[in-house]
């Protein structure tokens, strides 16, 4: 995909909030939401601050561990929809598999049952920190087919250049992946592509034509590399899943603080924030 030479100020920026994730704990940030009510309240605050998409993981309330339990996903899904009917819900199919090793079927069951507007689809197998994150070619194809059948828009999470190629091959098979192709460029996971401007430029360059993309940069890279992505024409994902700090040594009190920061940056660099309905148009989702 050609990297535009000029900033397209008309192109609105989709902010995704990822308030939970699989890896952070309340020890890393005591404000991490765990219960369906807490997650829903954080999504609402983030929506009020400017996020159009909520990328959601489920946690077991007793152990606080990630879970793939469909009943828990349902409780969260319904709580979020009630608290924030407008936001686009994207459920995770990673769902902590690298940490807890769920089966391929466990990881897609909640998508089949709840049919969210969007779901993540991890585009390759890798070492993630000290764990194995398994996303075999068969799984990727099956998940893509299931999502196509259910009209769930996949966001391809790519942690390296080779994973973009995995999706490129899938795109060539007719009928599985509707345009525009939607990518989350993950930079800075231990075991994945390191977070740098050079690597981001290279990744954007490698995307198929007619792709929509956002930067998912980890830890202290979240805001600076996300800002580079915004200037390059992409979206930005913020939230505790990838980063629990508001600034150096200062924990964020809410995911919404990170969304607020992203909004200010987007406005300062001359772009505008997409509402959920504008995000639906950009991603070719059905109108609400
Ligand atoms: N944790 C992110 C770096 C997923 O949930 O499917 C990637 C992610 C994947 O959000
Ligand atoms: Zn996730």
Image (cartoon, grey):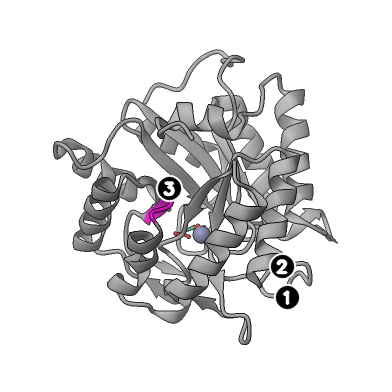
How far separated are the C-alphas under marks 2 and 1?
A: 6 Å
Residue 132 rendering spot, x and y as whole percentages: 38, 74
The answer to whether marks 2 and 1 mark residues whose Cβ atoms lie closer than 8 Å is yes
How far separated are the C-alphas under marks 3 and 1?
A: 27 Å
**Which residue is outermost to the right?**
250
Residue 158 in view: no
Residue 175 in view: yes
Relative to 12, 254 lies left or right: right
Residue in the image at 32% along x and 61% along y: 112
Mark 3 and mark 1 lie on one chain; the one further toward the N terminus is 1
On screen, 171 above or below 27?
above
On screen, 26 above or below 279?
below
Q: Which residue is mark 1?
A: 26
SS state under label 3: strand
Mark 1 CB near ligand 1 (8 Å cut): no
Q: Is residue 106 magenta?
A: no
Mark 2 and mark 1 lie on one chain; the one further toward the N terminus is 1
Residue 215 rendering spot, x and y as whole percentages: 54, 42
Q: Nearer the viewer, mark 3 or mark 2?
A: 3
Give residue 32's mark.
Answer: 2
Residue in the image at 72% along x and 23% along y: 269
Mark 3 and mark 2 lie on one chain; the one further toward the N terminus is 2
**Which residue is outermost to the left?**
174
Q: Which residues are magenta?
A: 115-121
Give residue 42's mark.
Answer: none
Q: Quadrant of the N terminus?
A: top left
Q: Which residue is mark 3?
A: 118
The answer to whether marks 3 and 2 mark residues whose Cβ atoms lie closer than 8 Å is no
Residue toward you, 218 or 237: 237
Relative to 216, 98 lies left or right: left
């Amino acid at each position: 995909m050609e990297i535009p030479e000029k900033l397209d100020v008309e192109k609105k920026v989709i902010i995704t909030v990822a308030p939970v994730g699989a890896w952070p704990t309340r020890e890393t940030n005591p404000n991490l939401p765990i219960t369906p009510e807490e997650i829903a309240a954080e999504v609402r605050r983030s929506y009020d601050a400017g996020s159009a998409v909520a990328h959601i993981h489920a946690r077991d309330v007793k152990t606080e561990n990630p879970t793939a339990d469909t009943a828990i996903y349902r409780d969260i899904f319904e709580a979020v929809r009630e608290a924030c009917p407008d936001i686009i819900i994207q459920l995770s199919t990673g769902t902590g598999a690298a940490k807890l090793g769920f089966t391929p079927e466990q990881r897609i069951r909640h998508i089949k049952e709840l049919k969210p507007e969007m779901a993540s689809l991890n585009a390759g197998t890798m070492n993630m920190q000290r764990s194995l994150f398994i996303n075999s070619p068969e799984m990727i194809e099956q998940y893509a087919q299931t999502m196509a059948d259910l009209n769930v828009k996949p966001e391809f999470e790519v942690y390296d250049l080779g994973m973009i190629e995995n999706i490129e091959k899938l795109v060539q098979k007719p009928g599985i992946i509707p345009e525009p192709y939607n990518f989350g460029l993950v930079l800075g996971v231990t075991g994945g592509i390191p977070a740098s401007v050079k690597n981001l430029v290279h990744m954007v360059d490698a995307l198929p034509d007619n792709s929509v993309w956002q930067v998912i940069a980890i830890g202290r890279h979240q805001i600076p590399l996300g800002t580079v992505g915004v200037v390059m024409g992409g979206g930005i994902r913020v939230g505790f899943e990838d980063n629990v700090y508001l600034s150096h040594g200062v924990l964020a009190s809410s995911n919404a603080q990170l969304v607020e920061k992203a909004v200010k940056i987007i406005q300062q660099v001359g772009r505008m924030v997409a509402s959920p309905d504008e995000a639906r148009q950009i991603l070719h989702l059905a109108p609400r």
